[in-house]
Amino acid sequence: MSTPLTIFHCSDLHFGQDCDLDQIAGMEVLAAELAPTAIAVAGDLTQRARHGEFQRALVFAQAMRRIAPTIIVPGNHDVQWWATPFNVIGAKAKYEKFRKYFGDDLTPTLVIDGAVLCGVLSSYGVVAGSMTPNLNDMAVKGHLPAGETDRACDRFAGEPAGFLRVLVMHQNLLRGNISRRMGLANWRQAWRAVENCGADLVLCGHDHEEATGTLPNGTVVATSGTHTARTRGGRASACNLITADATSITVQHHCWDRAAGAFTAETAATFPRHRSREHHPSGA
Ligand SMILES: [Fe+2]
């Protein structure tokens, strides 16, 4: 990779009554200014999976696509889980509206020069795999089936060795700093699967607090915030700019400055690209 590639990463826009449209306009300005190589929208585009919310989300997606190739995955708020709890009439009905506006493929892959971004589905509504002993988690937590990371692993294997391998998913893979909550049921199993699939970077959202960190093997995880008033601890909303070169990945948060009516670049964290040091793919 000769020149660094950049990914504008946002999530949890929650179009509907809580969405801050000033921030949405601000994000469109910011993304255009940053001129990223790619854009990743990591789910929860809507609040209640309503047609009008999806339609507004589509307008945002169209604005992003004018700036750079864009990958979008659904979040738990985009899933009409009540249409088919526990998949009693199959899984199809709960994704019907998302598919109407964003296409049949719930797990798209985006290949750009120097990177492959693979969407994986972690939001399934009320199903056995996402259940935990805590009833408050119902329809909120997700899970990461082995088939999702296996597909990503296969997809990653088909790209040049130097390509940045990125998973895009909704639920936060790391524990929230303020919430102390994991986004996934069976998160240890998910961590192992993500480590084994060869991802360099995971882009997620859901916890409404921006964060960066790594899995035990060094896989970098970036979590984006929300563009509603429902931030953790009254914090400013944040989205991320990822910059990657051959040896490092930098995650920079851009936080909403309400008085200025604009996002401003805040702290950045830089991590080594762990596969540049050592990588043991699944089964190796
Ligand atoms: Fe969410």
Image (cartoon, rainbow, N blue to C red):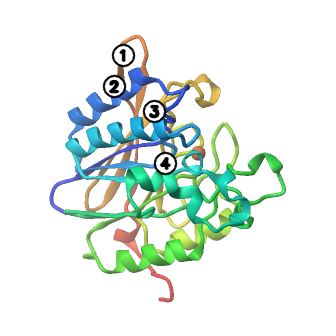
Q: CA distance from mark 4 to mark 3?
A: 15 Å
Count residues near mark 2 (Cα–Cα under 10 Å), then give few for <14, some for 14-19, many for 20+. Answer: some
Task: Specify the quadrant that holds the N terminus.
Answer: bottom left
Q: Helix, strand, or loop for circle 4?
A: loop
Farthest-out residue, top: 259
| First reached walking from the N terminus: tag 4 or tag 3 | 4
Q: Is residue 259 left or right of residue 236?
A: left
Amino acid type at image mark 3: Ala
Which of discs 4 and 3 lies nearer the camera? The answer is 4
Q: Quadrant of residue 27?
A: top left
Residue located beneath label 4 in the image: 43
Question: Element at badge 1?
Answer: loop
Above/below status of 163 relative to 266: below
Please tell me in which quarter of the rendered image ligand 1 is found.
Answer: top right
Q: Residues within 10 Å of mark 4 (few under 14, many from 20)?
A: many
Mark 4 CB lies closer than 8 A to ligand 1: yes
User: Does the CB distance between marks 4 and 3 fall below 8 Å?
Assistant: no
Q: Are marks 1 and 2 in contact (CB under 8 Å)?
A: yes
Is residue 203 in view from this perspective?
no
**Residue indicated by mark 1:** 261
Spatial separation of the CA atoms under disc 1 and disc 3: 13 Å
Q: In the image, which is nearer the foreground, mark 2 or mark 3?
A: 2
Q: Secondary structure at mark 3?
A: strand
Instruction: Kindly identify the residue that appears in the image at 36 percent across and 74 percent down.
Output: 156
* Residue type at tag 2: Gly
Q: Quadrant of residue 152?
A: bottom left
| Sequence-first tag of 1 and 3 | 3
> Mark on residue 26?
2
Q: Give the residue at x 63% y 63%.
A: 143
Cβ atoms at labels 1 and 3 below 8 Å apart: no
The disc labelled 4 sits on which kind of residue? Gly
Q: Report helix, strand or loop for mark 2.
A: helix
